[in-house]
Image (cartoon, helix red, strand yellow):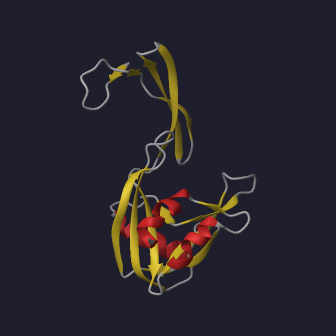
Amino acid sequence: MTPVTPAGSSAKPILTVGPDQVLHRGQFLTLMQRPFLDSRSSRCGHWEYVERKNKGRVVTVVGITEQDELILTKTLRLPFGREGEPVLEFCAGLPDREGECEVDLARRELLEETGYVCKNICPLVSGVISAGLTSDEMAIYVGTGATKVQAPKLEPAEVIEVVLVPKTKFRALLSDPPDGLKVDLKLWALLPLLCE
C-alpha cells in the first residue's frame, strides 16, 4: 500500500492505497478497482473507476456559424433506456489517430458529425469531466465562421442529428427542451461563456 498525503501537506497520510486491480477489460474501457485504508477511521474499502484505452484528452468543439448559430447535435446515447435516448450536446471525440493534435481532432469531429468546417478555432476551457468515475480530461474548443461543406459522415452506430440554435435562443432551448430530449450539463456550463 502507498501512503497518500494531501497536496502541499506534511501531515500524516489520510489514505493508503493498494495496487490497482482489473475487474473487466472491454474493447474501449477497463473497469478498475483501487483498494484503500483510511487512517482516520481505520476503514478499508475500494474505489471503482473506469479507464479509457485511448490516451489523451477528450476534445469537444463548439461550432458557431457565420449567422451566429451554435452547432449542436442530438445524439442517440445507448446508456439511457433500453433503446437509448437523445441527448443534446456539442460535437466531441477521442484522440484515436496517431500524431493528431487537439485542434485537428476538433476540426475533424465537427466535420464528420455535422458537415461543418470553421475558419478559426481556439481553446476555451479544459479540465476533468467526472472525477469520481474516470480520469478523463476534456479540452473544449470554439470554432467560428463555420460553414456547411458536406453531409455528415457518421461512424457505425452513430445516430446524430444536427441542431442549429441562434445564440439568442440557446438559454430558452436549455430551459425547455423538447419532450424526451436530455441536455448535456456542459451546455449549461458553457452558456455564460458563449452567450452572456
Q: Is residue 156 shown to the viewer in this render?
A: no
Image point 52% across, 78% down: which residue?
A: 168
Q: Is residue 94 left or right of residue 177?
A: left
Q: Quadrant of residue 72?
A: bottom right
Please report the residue visible at 44 percent of the width from the left and 18 percent of the height from the top: 37
Q: Position of residue 5 (x, y in %)?
A: 31, 25
Q: Residue furthest top?
A: 42
Work out whether 14 lies above or below 90. above
> Nearest the camera: 176 or 112?
176
**Extreme front residue here?**
196
Residue 160's spot in the image, x, y percent?
Answer: 62, 70
Q: Is residue 54 above or below residue 149?
A: above
What residue is rendered at 57% in x and 43% in y?
A: 26
Foreground of the two, 126 or 53: 126
x 52%, y 63%: residue: 187
Percent coordinates x, y for residue 193 in the rendering: 41, 67
Which image quarter is the C terminus in?
bottom left
Does residue 54 appear in this view?
Answer: yes
Image position of 22 (left or right of 138):
right
Which image quadrant: the N terminus? top left
> Which residue sits furthest right?
82
Looking at the image, is 49 positioned above or below residue 69? above
Q: Residue 23 appears in which quarter of the rendering?
A: top right
Instruction: Please tell me how many numbered marks the rendered image carries.
Output: 0
* Residue 114 image point, x, y percent: 54, 76
